[in-house]
Image (cartoon, rainbow, N blue to C red):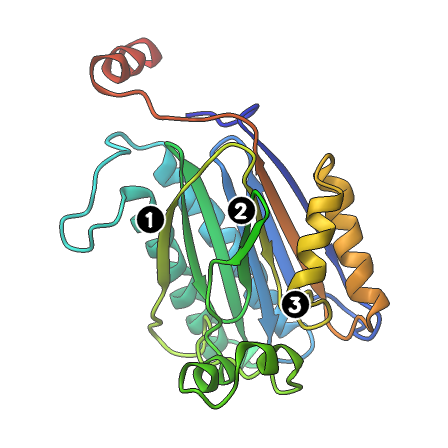
Amino acid sequence: MNLRGKIEFAEITDTGRVRDHNEDAIGSDPDIGLMVLADGMGGYNAGEVASGIAVQIVSELATEGAGRENRDEIDPHSGLMRQSIVLRDAVYRANKIIFQTAQSQTHCEGMGTTIVACMFYDNKVSIAHVGDSRAYRLRGGQFDQLTLDHSLLQELVDRGFYSAEEAQRSTNRNYVTRALGVEPTVEVEVHEYEVLPEDVYLLCSDGLPDMVEDEEIHLTISSFDASLDIVGKQLIELANDHGGRDNVSVQLAQVIAPFAAKKGIFAKLARMFRT
């Protein structure tokens, strides 16, 4: 299914005001409804190697998987849609390649990256993430964080040591407990959501929420939703105006119209005419 005309996309990445190079990487494919964002770490150059590998591998494997038949199959073991499995397995593969690269190349030793990726299909979206890069959704007047950070601070919130409001103001927000490339295997968190027209989805590296509170992000998207490009630029500008202590990347998707998959005989006929 080609999603052009169904979903509008925009993306932007910026070095920020303090760092001298950008270790974030972003990639998207509007035709298949894919967005991928990674925030690298591990010293000069190595972080951007890790994030670049992550975005490249996930983009390639997700694009390959999107073209397969039986796109609406549900995995009997996990209960996840096949698109979620494709996205999850692509992240697994990226982790393996980053880990092997870090082990085999001295200048890449210790590198890693967070990742958040989403794929839209059949009026749904699958979101996979590792680390503290985030996904948000604006639906009507409700702005929700769809991913929970894999971080020490989030664990402390979960255990009741911090409230969500105290965590937002904490200066110890960047200790991730899970990242790609650090271990031979990694646990990938995957969720599926129903999608509605006019929904706006935001993927971002931690350079945005570390500098800009969720309420201000919400207000910015709501105020400039007529143009996703303007929203993206405004969010980057806000992060930099608040100090820009880190690289900052944002990807946005706004649902314009429903995109239900063809079912039954209609889907079979469509496949016959494509061959």
Residue 63 seen anywhere in this rendered image of the structure: no
Give the class, few, some or many, for how many residues have Cα within 10 Å of label 1's Cα (few <14, many ≥20): many
Quadrant for the N terminus, please: top left
Q: CA distance from mark 1 to mark 2?
A: 13 Å
Instruction: Say which amino acid is labelled 1.
Output: Ser
Q: Amino acid at mark 3?
A: Pro
* Callout in the foreground (3, 2): 3
Number of marks present in the image shown: 3
**C-alpha separation, residue under disc 3 versus residue under disc 1:** 26 Å
- Say what amino acid the circle numbered 2 marks: Met
Up/down of 70 relative to 253, above or below: above
Residue 114 screen position, x and y as percent:
52, 68
Residue 175, visible in the rendered structure: yes
Which residue is situated farthest in the left direction here?
76
Residue at horizontal 42 percent and vertical 72 percent from the top:
100
Please report whichever mark, 3 or 2, sits nearer to the chain's N-terminal start.
2
